Amino acid sequence: MRPLFHPSIEDVRLEAILHALSDPVRVEIFADIAGAQCAQTCSAFANVNDRMIPKSSLSQHFKVLREAGLIHSERQGVEMHNTSRCEEVQTRFPGLVAAIINAHAAEAKRAKAS
């Protein structure tokens, strides 16, 4: 198996983060991982926003989040366990992650109210 690529925090670019979180599925996945108290498996996100996500698409979403520096993934047997890198990103881009997650939560609340 190929090793997973995780950029050092110094190599994380703002453009990569914004690109990664521009997709509604990825921002939902990231918000859930960031709010979790423990590692989340990829299979926990087979349904996002009440729609099934194919495994191949899910793998690509996790790859984009990982390579943007937003999550850390670790293989454990046949599962991939994912944790957020919010603290590291916070030191590089203060307030960015909180602003994005808060905006996402507000948008989700507004969508449910409609």
Image (cartoon, helix red, strand yellow):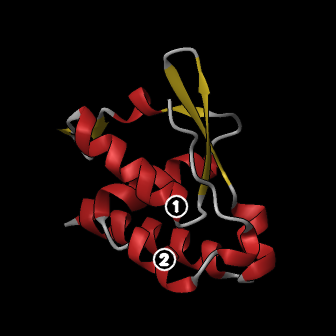
Amino acid type at image mark 2: Ala
The x, y position of residue 29, in whole percent, is 43, 50
Could you tell me which secondary element the residue under label 2 belongs to? helix
Residue drawn at point x = 81 percent, y = 76 percent: 91
Within the image, what quadrant is residue 81 found in? top right
Residue drawn at point x = 50 percent, y = 29 percent: 1
Number of the label disc, if any, that sits on residue 67: 1
Dots 2, 1 in contact, CB < 8 A:
yes
Within the image, what quadrant is residue 82 found in? top right
* Front-most of residues 71 and 31: 71
* Front-most of residues 18 and 99: 18
Vertical arrangement, residue 34 with respect to residue 93, above or below:
above
The x, y position of residue 26, in whole percent, is 38, 57
Badge 2: few (under 14), some or many (20 or more) residues near its Cα, within 10 Å? Answer: some
Quarter of the picture holding the C terminus: bottom left
Within the image, what quadrant is residue 28 found in? bottom left
Badge 1: few (under 14), some or many (20 or more) residues near its Cα, within 10 Å? Answer: some
**Residues under labels 2 and 1: Cα distance?**
8 Å
| Of pointers 2 and 1, the one earlier in the residue sequence | 2
Amino acid type at image mark 1: Glu
Vertical arrangement, residue 69 with respect to residue 10, above or below:
above
Say which residue label 2 marks: 16
Residue drawn at point x = 37 percent, y = 64 percent: 109
Residue drawn at point x = 77 percent, y = 66 percent: 88
Could you tell me which secondary element the residue under label 1 belongs to? helix
- Horizontal side of 5 relative to 108 (left or right) equals right
